Amino acid sequence: MQLSSQESIEDVVQESQQFEEEIFLDAIRDFYEQEFEDHKELFDYAAERTNNFRNFGPSVIRDNPNVVKVLRYLVKPPISQMKFGQMSGINSTDSYEKDNPTTPNTNTAEQMADFVERNLDERKVPWLHENVQDEDYELEQSREWVCDIIAQSEAKTRYRNWRKDVQEEKVAETMMEAGLEKVSRSSVLESKDDIPTGSFVPETKVAVSGGDNQKADFVARKRDGGLVFIEAKAIGVKIDSYKRIKEIRNKESDWRSTYPDADVGAALSGWIPESQIDTLVNDNITIFWEHRLDTLHSYFS
């Protein structure tokens, strides 16, 4: 970790926290809006095909399997994919909720429709249980409520997956800009010679002494032949940092038990206490901050 004469580790940690918060707020808002709009369309489809949730049948699901997501959140309480699948004689409804969904058979769809009809949350469909002055208004309120709950959940999941991908893409791009070649391999890395000099492999399993294979986000071979293991962590919540830093340290121990001369690095961003940074430094783990990846570039140049 490179610091100027004018700054401290605390300064860099605070920069990283601000960097992570800006990424989080920008991205998760976009994900939330996308999910909200997508599920409003599914809600409207379900309402139209069931006479505002009065008459369920298998065709409403078979004609648009993605509607299963909305139906899961209309029951009381919202039910998971695996639990809903179990209630309908299958393992999970996951495959019906993907971008390119499979279609449930008629029997499965009928079981799902029956379950939803029996377990609708009366607060989300009050017009089915009492006289309401304006059913369209109540339907709109229900749509806002249900789609908000779904969008919150889906946005968080999308952000977690997206954030990891973005960070790893930045690290890979930086190494390529430094002159390393990106290569791929499907088998477990058992020797440093499995990686050509001046190249790197993303996300690969590494055979370690006396234990299971240990996955690395990146394994690189410097031009001088030296081996480098790098873990990438973007940490959005401070309390999670203790577990994530421990994971890096455990991997470092495993890798160096087999490759004692290897370098180990951590590409980091987010809410990480200075005390946790100190533990990495004490373990001789080189830190590359995501908002300062020029240090990673210099390392491999």
Image (cartoon, rainbow, N blue to C red):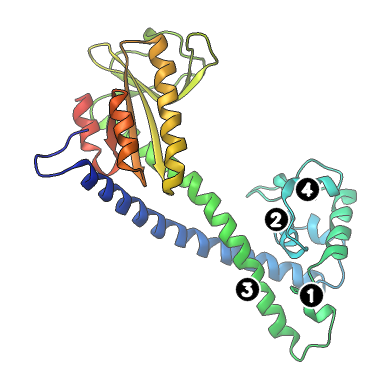
Is the residue 194 above or below the residue 143 in the image? above
Tag 3: amino acid: Glu
Q: Earlier in the sequence, mark 4 or mark 3?
A: 4
The one nearer the camera, 252 or 95, is 252
In front: label 1 or label 4:
4
Q: Earlier in the sequence, mark 2 or mark 1?
A: 1
Q: CA distance from mark 1 to mark 3?
A: 15 Å
- SS for dot 4: helix
Q: Earlier in the sequence, mark 1 or mark 3?
A: 1
- SS for dot 2: helix
Q: Which residue is mark 3?
A: 144
Res. 142 image quadrant: bottom right
- SS for dot 1: loop
* Label 1 crowd (10 A; few <14 / some 14-19 / many >=20): some
- SS for dot 3: helix
In front: label 2 or label 4:
4
* Label 2 crowd (10 A; few <14 / some 14-19 / many >=20): many
Q: Which residue is mark 2?
A: 66
Q: CA distance from mark 2 to mark 4?
A: 17 Å
Residue 52 has which mark? 1
Whether residue 221 is visible to the viewer of this picture, yes or no, is yes
Q: Earlier in the sequence, mark 2 or mark 3?
A: 2
* Label 4 crowd (10 A; few <14 / some 14-19 / many >=20): some
Q: CA distance from mark 1 to mark 4?
A: 25 Å
Q: Earlier in the sequence, mark 2 or mark 4?
A: 2
Residue 83 has which mark? 4
